[in-house]
């Protein structure tokens, strides 16, 4: 009984926390399952409601109701805007939508901070609720008990609308059979708009009512997004009851778990998420085709297409492509085509070599950081473009390589080649351990599993303080030596030259492998997996080797980053860096190694150089870069120079591993469980 009394308050807190997450996750589930939008800006919608409610709260019932109306309306309008932005991408798969919505989340987060300030806002609840009541002999905040009631009523109302009304029937039909829905006179565009607006309204209402629990602040959006993703994955999309119990479980882990097992609590959620995804993927059939019927008619989509076509015509007129040359003979390229293919790499090499003589010390240090991020982006390109495994978790082996180098330096192992080799080996071993959990999944499921791996690694970084320094990071370790017996590297130009040499060797080795028969087998496994399996090829071995190799390459990038920066913090290996690496790969073209380096350079220049002229607006600029890249570069920079099949010897369009965006749903649920085919 004493143990029950000790944990009663955290347990009730867990119920309130879980109900809050249930309301938010219901909106995320609705947007993904019905509209097919993997909305990584859903946490920002919650923040819109939370900030609005906190700003209008004045300790009265009128202030609470006004905040609820204003916050819900504001988030609903933002959700409608997301519909307009994402609808043109409906046939491009979930990766493009994820990058777009993440960019919009960066823009929205920056605007919220500029408008409301960078500090956490206080929330004033009505005086009648700003007290505590007796709960089985314990004092408990009255507002939280009231919130439990309000959340139950809100969830019940949403369920009634979805299951018992004509509007709900149209929403469920949009997920189950959109063609039949269109035949009955409903516009898919209107349903798409209504679903995302309703999802925004749910998130906004939860933000207003839940602000005293998860208050408005700079980290609110990311926290809510991550927890909501865990709830959706654990509960699936087939049953609201499953989502409800998953949300309660997550809430209990976040409150009761911290008091009972504080050392394990940071790992439990994402470990459970990864385990559920792996088990579901193992029992699901992999996707074997696109399942798309062509582009969705849309004025904005046509406008974007015309802009992209005009941009491609301008580039082609200034730089003829290999596609305009006569077809090469087997085993040999015409000299002109060969030079044109090699030209971007040669230009990049010449520019990189010339940088130390052209730039100041600070900009040179940024160039070294861009090379480190570029290696991470190249590893993402290998997995996303060649292996067909879109990833948001390459920061995990990147972190392993980085912390390996930092600890080696602290132990006196300061020779650069030794650090590189051991960091690559450590990252490869890490990838070999985690690889079997990833390579059997497909599409968005891979994104979610790798996200879980990355978040588990981040939790370990914060917990293992003796190795990682925890939240403070590592600093003060000895500098790297380029060779045995050489001098320490301190000058920015020396560090940049070291990073350039390492990057050149790593990229050259990657290109050799990708253009070898092994690379052709990997590309074949991505493009025709079923046929490769039927021919007796061990596709899973090819994918595992590719995953391990990409992990080793990411480890090299982490080692280079530590050497260049001379310090290491958890922010250097977090989720945001994973999204940047994926964006760099998309900017360059998902099958262009050189393009990934260009993309990384553009991101670092935007984040650290351009943003320096507009302090405090780095996230806004990066968000604009995300949005522009998704709309204007559907095949990346490399795709502007020629046909998709010309990039790095393979196709740059999404392969069969990219799931179809359309999601089927049973008539009694808002959406299906997309695990194994089209979602988390």
Image: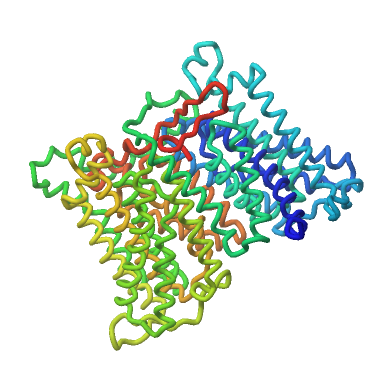
What quarter of the picture does the N terminus occupy?
bottom right
Residue at the image point whose x is 23% and y is 61% from the top:
509
**Residue 525 seen in this snapshot:** yes
Count of residue discs: 0
Residue at the image point whose x is 40% and y is 26% from the top:
295
**Front residue (pair 84, 68):** 68
| Left or right: residue 53 compared with residue 412 | right
Quadrant position of residue 166: top right
Colouring chosen for the image of the structure: rainbow
**Front residue (pair 671, 323):** 671
**Front residue (pair 418, 617):** 418
Q: Is residue 232 above or below residue 462?
A: above
Whole-percent x, y for residue 43 in the image: 62, 45
Whole-percent x, y for residue 232 in the image: 56, 40
**Front residue (pair 55, 411):** 411
Q: Is residue 414 above or below residue 384?
A: below
Residue at the image point whose x is 35% and y is 31% from the top:
290
| Left or right: residue 467 compared with residue 595 | right
**Outermost residue to the front:** 1
Whole-percent x, y for residue 492 in the image: 41, 76
Whole-percent x, y for residue 418 in the image: 30, 77
**Outermost residue to the top:** 184
| Left or right: residue 422 compared with residue 394 | left
């Amino acid at each position: 009984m004493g143990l029950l009394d000790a944990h009663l308050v955290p347990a009730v807190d867990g119920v309130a926390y879980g109900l809050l997450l249930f309301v938010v996750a219901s909106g995320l589930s609705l947007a993904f399952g019905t509209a097919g939008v993997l909305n990584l800006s859903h946490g920002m919608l919650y923040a819109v409601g939370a900030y609005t409610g906190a700003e209008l709260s004045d300790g009265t019932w009128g202030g609470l109701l006004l905040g609820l109306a204003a916050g819900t309306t504001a988030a609903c309008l933002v959700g409608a805007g997301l519909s307009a932005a994402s609808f043109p991408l409906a046939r491009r798969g979930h990766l493009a939508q994820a990058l777009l919505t993440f960019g919009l989340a960066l823009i929205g987060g920056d605007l919220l901070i500029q408008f409301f300030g960078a500090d956490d806002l206080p929330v004033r609840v009505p005086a009648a609720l700003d007290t505590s009541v007796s709960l089985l002999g314990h004092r408990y905040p009255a507002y939280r008990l009231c919130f439990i009631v309000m959340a139950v009523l809100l969830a019940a109302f949403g369920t009634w609308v979805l299951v018992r009304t004509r509007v709900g029937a149209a929403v469920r039909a949009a997920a189950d059979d959109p063609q039949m829905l269109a035949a009955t006179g409903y516009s898919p565009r209107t349903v798409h708009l209504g679903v995302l607006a309703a999802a925004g309204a749910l998130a906004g209402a939860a933000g207003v009512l839940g602000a005293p629990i998860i208050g408005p602040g700079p980290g609110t959006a990311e926290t809510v997004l991550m927890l909501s993703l865990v709830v959706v994955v654990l509960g699936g999309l087939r049953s609201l009851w499953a989502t409800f119990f998953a949300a309660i479980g997550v809430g209990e882990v976040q409150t009761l778990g911290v008091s009972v097992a504080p050392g394990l609590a940071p790992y439990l959620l994402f470990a459970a998420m990864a385990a559920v995804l792996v088990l579901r993927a193992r029992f699901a059939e992999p996707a074997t085709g696109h399942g798309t019927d062509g582009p969705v008619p849309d004025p904005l989509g046509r406008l974007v297409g015309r802009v992209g076509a005009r941009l491609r015509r301008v580039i082609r007129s200034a730089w003829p492509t290999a596609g305009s040359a006569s077809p090469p003979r087997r085993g040999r390229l015409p000299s002109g085509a060969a030079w044109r293919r090699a030209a971007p790499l040669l230009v990049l090499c010449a520019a990189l070599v010339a940088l130390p003589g052209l730039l100041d010390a600070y900009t040179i240090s940024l160039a070294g950081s861009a090379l480190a991020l570029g290696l991470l982006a190249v590893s993402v390109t290998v997995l996303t473009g060649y292996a067909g495994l879109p990833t948001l978790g390459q920061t995990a082996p990147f972190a392993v390589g980085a912390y390996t180098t930092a600890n080696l330096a602290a132990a006196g192992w300061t020779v650069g080649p030794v650090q590189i080799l051991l960091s690559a080996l450590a990252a490869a071993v890490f990838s070999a351990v985690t690889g079997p959990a990833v390579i059997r999944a497909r599409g968005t499921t891979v994104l979610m599993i790798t996200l879980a791996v990355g978040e588990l690694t981040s939790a370990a970084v914060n917990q293992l303080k003796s190795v990682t320094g925890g939240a403070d990071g590592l600093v003060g370790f000895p500098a790297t030596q380029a060779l045995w017996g050489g001098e320490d590297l301190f000058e920015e130009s020396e560090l940049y030259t070291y990073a350039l040499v390492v990057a050149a060797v790593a990229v050259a080795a990657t290109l050799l492998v990708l253009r070898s028969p092994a690379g052709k087998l990997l590309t074949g496994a991505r493009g025709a997996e079923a046929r490769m399996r039927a021919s007796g090829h061990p596709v899973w071995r090819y994918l595992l080797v590719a995953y391990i190799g990409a992990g080793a390459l990411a480890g090299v990038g982490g080692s280079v980053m530590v050497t260049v920066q001379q310090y290491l913090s958890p922010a250097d290996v977090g989720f945001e860096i994973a999204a940047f690496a994926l964006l760099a790969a998309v900017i360059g073209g998902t099958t262009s190694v050189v393009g990934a380096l260009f993309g990384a350079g553009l991101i670092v220049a935007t984040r650290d150089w351009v943003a320096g002229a507009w302090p405090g607006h780095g996230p806004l600029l990066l968000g604009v870069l995300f949005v522009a890249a998704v709309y204007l570069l559907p095949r990346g920079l490399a795709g502007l120079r020629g046909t998709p099949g010309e990039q790095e010897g393979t196709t740059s369009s999404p392969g069969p591993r990219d799931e179809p965006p359309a999601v089927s749903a049973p008539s009694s649920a808002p959406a299906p469980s997309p695990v194994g085919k089209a979602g988390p």
